[in-house]
Image: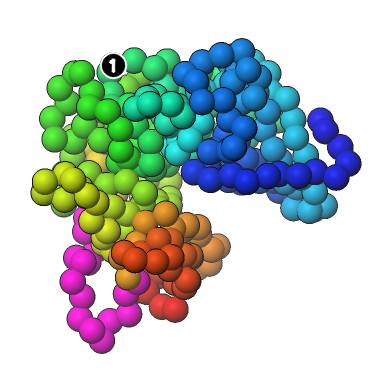
């Protein structure tokens, strides 16, 4: 662990998962990230993780152990479960190269474990979301959305939605019911119960796929069984003027507040022509927004 005055440096397209009383920060787009697919220098660079302790307010840098770290360091999907942080996919940093491997990082031992290696089984991508949900005593990693390369194996119109079982560690292409979201990237998703999550905003491709269209729709997704995900669109993108509703955006942040009913806090993002400087609360019992 490095000590003394610590300089984090510039970083983007990363995640900052919270485990216990600490924030962990790995990868991201940084000026000194080697722009290659793989090299000893890149692996050494990505074998370091940064940690912020809430109690002291101090950053520290730690060398990781175990298997080699993921190579998709930019725009990866990320979520937590107990002391583990899970990473999926990501942009490699060179050319049009994406990954779809699943890795876990133990925040106590600082060890990496590869759960599923990169393959052609599912879409290789970045810029989506991932949550951990539970059904009948088994936990699943639920990956949705993102942008990347077309999979070589046909997977129906829902090729951007997959699950991984923590028990058998293999890909599951779930059955989709309800009103599912279209292919979306750069959105925010937050779990509100053991088997339900809320998704907001992001960008969807235009009809000619030459540009992205920002959206401000709220979706819920619920794991109903070990193979079925049910979706609902809470409100469409067009709402009455009398109803408070956030503008369309992407690259925003959402987290939850502990209360009698799950309440989400949404901050910032990028709008159509400029950065969005606002914050909202979403009551998930009635799905009403307030500033």
Q: Is residue 215 left or right of residue 105?
A: left
Where does the N terminus fall, quadrant-wise?
Answer: top right
Provide residue 10's location: percent of width, then percent of height: 63, 46
The residue pinned by badge 1 equals: 120
Where does the C terminus fall, quadrant-wise?
Answer: bottom left
Q: Residue at x 54, y 38 (%)?
A: 28
| Front-lying residue, 138 or 254 | 254
State the predominant SS element of the stretch in magenta: loop
Q: Residue at x 26, y 60 (%)?
A: 215
Q: Is residue 46 left or right of residue 171?
A: right
Q: Residue furthest bottom?
A: 242
Identify the secondary structure beneath mark 1. Answer: loop
| Front-lying residue, 200 or 19 | 200
Q: Residue at x 32, y 46 (%)?
A: 185
Q: Is residue 286 visible?
A: no
Q: Is residue 273 above or below residue 148?
A: below
Q: Is residue 201 left or right of residue 75?
A: left
**What is the image's colouring?**
rainbow
Q: Residue at x 43, y 31 (%)?
A: 90
Magenta stretch: give its range. Answer: 232-246
Provide residue 282's location: percent of width, then percent of height: 40, 69
Q: Is residue 1 above or below residue 266?
A: above
| Front-lying residue, 19 or 87 | 87
Provide residue 115's location: percent of width, then percent of height: 47, 19
Crowding around mark 1 (Cα neighbors within 10 Å: few <14, some 14 to 19, many 20+) is few
Q: Residue furthest right?
A: 4
Residue 209 sits in quarter? top left
Asked if residue 58 lies in the magenta stretch, the reply is no
Q: Is residue 62 visible?
A: yes
Provide residue 217's location: percent of width, then percent of height: 26, 62
Asked if residue 242 lies in the magenta stretch, the reply is yes
């Amino acid at each position: 662990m490095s000590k003394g005055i610590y300089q984090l440096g510039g970083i983007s397209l990363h995640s900052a998962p919270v485990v216990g009383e600490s924030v962990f920060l790995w990868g991201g787009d940084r000026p000194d990230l080697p722009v290659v697919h793989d090299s000893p220098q890149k692996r050494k660079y990505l074998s370091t993780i940064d940690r912020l302790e809430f109690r002291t307010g101090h950053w520290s840098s730690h060398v990781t152990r175990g298997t080699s770290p993921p190579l998709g360091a930019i725009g990866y999907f990320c979520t937590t479960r107990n002391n583990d942080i899970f990473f999926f996919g990501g942009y490699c940093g060179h050319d049009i190269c994406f990954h779809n491997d699943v890795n876990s990082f133990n925040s106590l031992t600082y060890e990496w474990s590869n759960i599923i290696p990169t393959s052609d089984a599912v879409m290789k991508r970045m810029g989506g979301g991932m949550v951990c949900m539970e059904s009948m005593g088994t936990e699943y990693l639920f990956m949705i959305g993102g942008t990347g390369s077309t999979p070589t194996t046909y997977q129906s119109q829902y090729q951007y939605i997959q699950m991984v079982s923590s028990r058998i560690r293999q890909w599951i292409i779930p059955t989709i019911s309800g009103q599912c979201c279209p292919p979306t990237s750069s959105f925010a998703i937050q779990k509100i119960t053991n088997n339900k999550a809320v998704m907001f905003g992001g960008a969807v491709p235009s009809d000619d796929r030459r540009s992205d269209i920002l959206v401000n729709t709220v979706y819920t997704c619920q794991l109903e069984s070990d193979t079925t995900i049910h979706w609902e669109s809470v409100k469409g993108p067009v709402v009455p003027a009398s109803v408070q509703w956030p503008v369309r955006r992407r690259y925003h942040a959402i987290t939850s507040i502990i209360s009698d009913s799950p309440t989400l806090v949404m901050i910032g993002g990028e709008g159509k022509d400029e950065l969005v400087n606002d914050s909202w609360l979403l009551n998930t019992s009635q799905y009403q927004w307030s500033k």
